Amino acid sequence: MVSESDSRSFPPIRRLVPGDLKQCIALSADRGWSPEKAKWSLLLEASEPFGVDAPDGRGLGGAVILTRWGTRLASVGMMLVAARYGRRGLGRALMEHLIGQAGDATVTLFATDMGRPLYEKLGFLPVRRSVSFAGTFRSRHDEDNSKKFITRPATQADLAAILDVDVAAFGADRGGIVGRLPGFAERIAVLDSGEDQGAARVTGYAAAWRNGPATTVIGPVVAPDAEAAARLIAHLAGQLRGNRTIRLDLDPDRQELPAWAQAHGLEPVARTTVMALGDLVPRGTPDRLFAPISVALA
């Protein structure tokens, strides 16, 4: 077994830039991940990506991304180490660097079973479970729009209201990412109260974005309740063209929406644990958060 001290043989950790996109995609492919070009592009532009150049000159040895939600909260995503450099302490070095950069902010992440031991050693504690549901979405004819839930495509004019709804639910400013959703997502839908002009009309929203050639992720999903969240998801799934796999990342301990997803053809395919380092104080209205933007953005 190679000791963790071998991480000192790597080049210094550096800030990645949009020009590193091809190397990030190659790193994903090295670990058997989908290329996720669009997601890497978004995070390289909107977040704080860090990486280490491979000592053999073949791209990146590893990478990790810090995304800040205001000043008190941040998330970890895309933590990857090239397979040929595994078990040499590089993952820990990248995480320790990221934690140092986060400062006093509480840091959250989605941990796989493989990554969880490292995060536990660094002091992260489990917060909740998450399950990915995926499959071909089966719509039902009894779920047409009603006066109670009016769903419609979002327009540019809705962006300010979407940001207001998001910060009220999440309890921290995700505008750096949410504000870029119109250019990143395939489709965005809003829940419209149908009230008179001048009153608050947008009460929830959801986005659908491509994750590879055959999969569409629906997230975030922010809504007043599970029934409204389901209506937003059904609206987006019904608007997508082609035979695409739909993926939803849901809390299995909030049974209503996972059960609804399974009734519509989506089955559990992967499980992760949301973990936090630091004080995760109550904030926002978490009951209105039904799906994350991505498991790279806890």
Image (tube, rainbow, N blue to C red):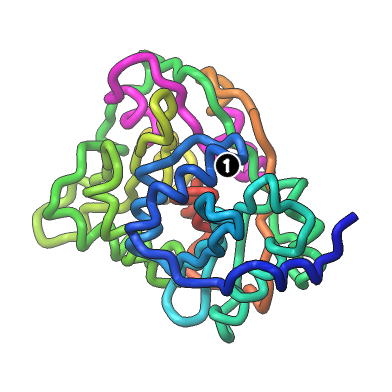
Q: Residue at x 13, y 52 (%)?
A: 156
Q: Is residue 32 visible?
A: yes
Q: Amino acid at mark 1?
A: Leu
- Quarter holding the N terminus is bottom right
- Residue 103 in the image: x percent, y percent? 57, 85
Residue 171 visible in the shown view = no
* Label 1: element kind: strand
25 vs 263: above or below: below
Among the 4 quarters of the image, the one containing residue 198: bottom left
Q: Which residues are magenta?
A: 233-260
* Residue in front for this viewpoint, 29 or 132: 29
Q: Which residue is mark 1?
A: 250
Nearest to the observer: residue 51 or residue 173: 51
- Which quarter of the image is occupied by the C terminus? bottom right
Residue sticking out furthest to the left:
197
Is residue 128 shown above or below 160? above
Residue 33 x, y percent position in the rendering:
56, 37
Residue 255, magenta (yes or no): yes
Q: Considering depth in this image, is 246 or 284 the residue closer to the camera?
A: 246
Q: Residue furthest bottom?
A: 104
